[in-house]
Image (tube, rainbow, N blue to C red):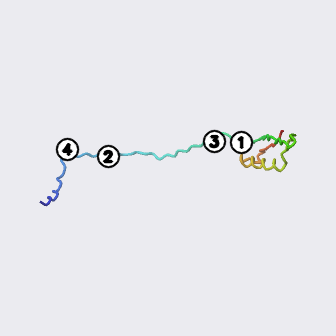
């Protein structure tokens, strides 16, 4: 039993046909949006207070070890780079130490 060949599809009944048409009447236009910056940083000043180390000697005496100028410069460079400070803008970093 071989399957029968598909018979030609007869044209659909005129009552079953539907069609739709869309017309768009578009006017060319250009939209531009301008957004002003909300704020501008004028200057940043940062103060860093470091705690000096208290060292207890073998005899029980305690001494304060001051932070060297070299260490302060390293910390100042670290803070300047981390915050993206710009000296030309007037940004400053003040490093101070206390016991």
The secondary element bearing badge 3 is classed as: loop
* 63 sits to left or right of 30: right
Q: Residue at x 18, y 54 (%)?
A: 9
The secondary element bearing badge 1 is classed as: loop
The answer to which quarter of the image holds residue 18 is top left
Distance Cα–Cα, label 4 vs label 2? 18 Å
Residue wearing tag 4: 15
Distance Cα–Cα, label 4 vs label 3? 61 Å
Q: Residue furthest left?
A: 1
Distance Cα–Cα, label 2 vs label 3? 44 Å
Whichever of callouts 2 and 1 sits on the residue coming sooner in the sequence is 2
Q: How many marks?
A: 4
* 18 sits to left or right of 96: left
Please report contact status of discs 2 and 1: CB closer than 8 Å, yes or no.
Answer: no
Q: Residue at x 18, y 52 (%)?
A: 11
* In this rendering, the label closer to the viewer, 2 or 1: 1
Whichever of callouts 4 and 2 sits on the residue coming sooner in the sequence is 4
The answer to which quarter of the image holds residue 66 is top right
Whichever of callouts 2 and 3 sits on the residue coming sooner in the sequence is 2
């Amino acid at each position: 039993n071989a399957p029968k060949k598909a018979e030609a599809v007869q044209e659909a009944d005129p009552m079953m046909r539907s069609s739709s048409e869309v017309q768009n009447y578009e006017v060319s236009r250009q939209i531009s949006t301008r957004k002003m910056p909300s704020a501008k940083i004028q200057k940043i000043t940062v103060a860093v207070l470091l705690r000096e180390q208290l060292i207890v000697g073998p005899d029980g005496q305690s001494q304060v070890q001051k932070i060297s100028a070299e260490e302060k410069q390293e910390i100042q460079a670290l803070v300047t780079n981390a915050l993206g400070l710009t000296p030309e803008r007037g940004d400053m970093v003040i490093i101070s130490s206390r016991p």
